Amino acid sequence: MFIDRRRAIAIGAVLALSGCGAPTPAPVTAPTSPPAASAPVVESPAPAAPIVESAPLVVPGAVTAGQLPAVVNHGSRDLKKVALTFDADMTDAMKARLRSGEVSSYANRTMLRTLEKQQIPATFFVTGQWAEVYPELTRRIAENPLFEIANHTYEHAAFTGDCYGLPRLPAAAMTEDVAKTFRTLEPFGGRQTRYMRFPGLCHDQAALRALAPLGVTVIDGDVVSGDPFARSAKPVVNAVLSQVKPGSIIIMHVTEANARFSDDALPIILAGLTKRGLQPVTLSELLT
């Protein structure tokens, strides 16, 4: 499974250079390390007592800690399902714009209402800082059984040296940045996962090695909506519906001020997926 990296990473370029940031599942709580099957319960001293084995706790996207993360661009092409994923970016520069009043919101509530009203499953890649700025919306996402939450790093900084102007994290800080995000998201509950997406989709072997202790699966995507660049809904709709196919992972954004026409595009995209017989599902379902 491959993606045009130069095209995908380029999503981060313009927004990064402008200081806006790259664009770029009842519930279980993401553990610090991936779960393992529980040991069988010891047989009771009573002669007739059966041995009962407990089921393993399954956290979507979890792999064995220490294993180099897999990088996933799409699911099976044999099933007519697609995953709608929404990035919730928040950088220090974006926080400053909110404080100064330069922008009013980096949270697209209209998109959230559309997904809720039409009962569309979705996966949200949330930065730790976005969850801190919008705790009520993060809780709302977590409480919806159709939604699941994934990790989009803490401060949306670059994990490589060529991520188009985003401030770069030191290599020694990469593991903690992603771990901090899991800790930030954990109290919200809901359908937590061990999926993770790099800002701008920028990653290399060093970045992947840094995440090995966390037992994550890295999610890129094969359908880049381009919504942060759009000047109307039409190019966003065209970008998605012209690229989408069975198994696709669609990348969009809920950062309103950075993706102004995503809420207008979303209903048209959903109608287009229906027309093509493609069913939106969570990443967990797509990748199971």
Image (spheres, rainbow, N blue to C red):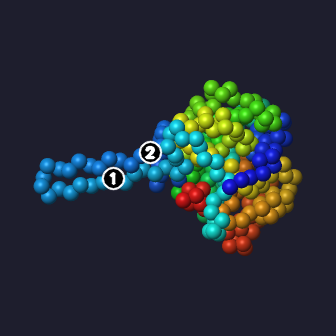
Q: Quadrant of residue 153?
A: top right
Dot 1: element: loop
Mark 2 is surrounded, within 10 Å at the Cα level, by few (under 14), some (14 to 19) or many (20 or more) other residues, namely: some
Q: Residue furthest left?
A: 47
Left or right: 60, with 11 as reference point: left
| Residue tagged 2 | 35
Specify the amino acid type for callout 2.
Pro
Quadrant housing the C terminus: bottom right
Q: Residue at x 46, y 51 (%)?
A: 58
| Residue tagged 1 | 54
Q: Residue at x 53, y 57 (%)?
A: 145
Specify the amino acid type for callout 1.
Ser
Above or below: residue 229 compared with residue 119 = above
Q: Position of residue 62 (x, y in %)?
A: 52, 47
Q: Residue at x 68, y 45 (%)?
A: 88
Residue 283 visible (yes or no): yes
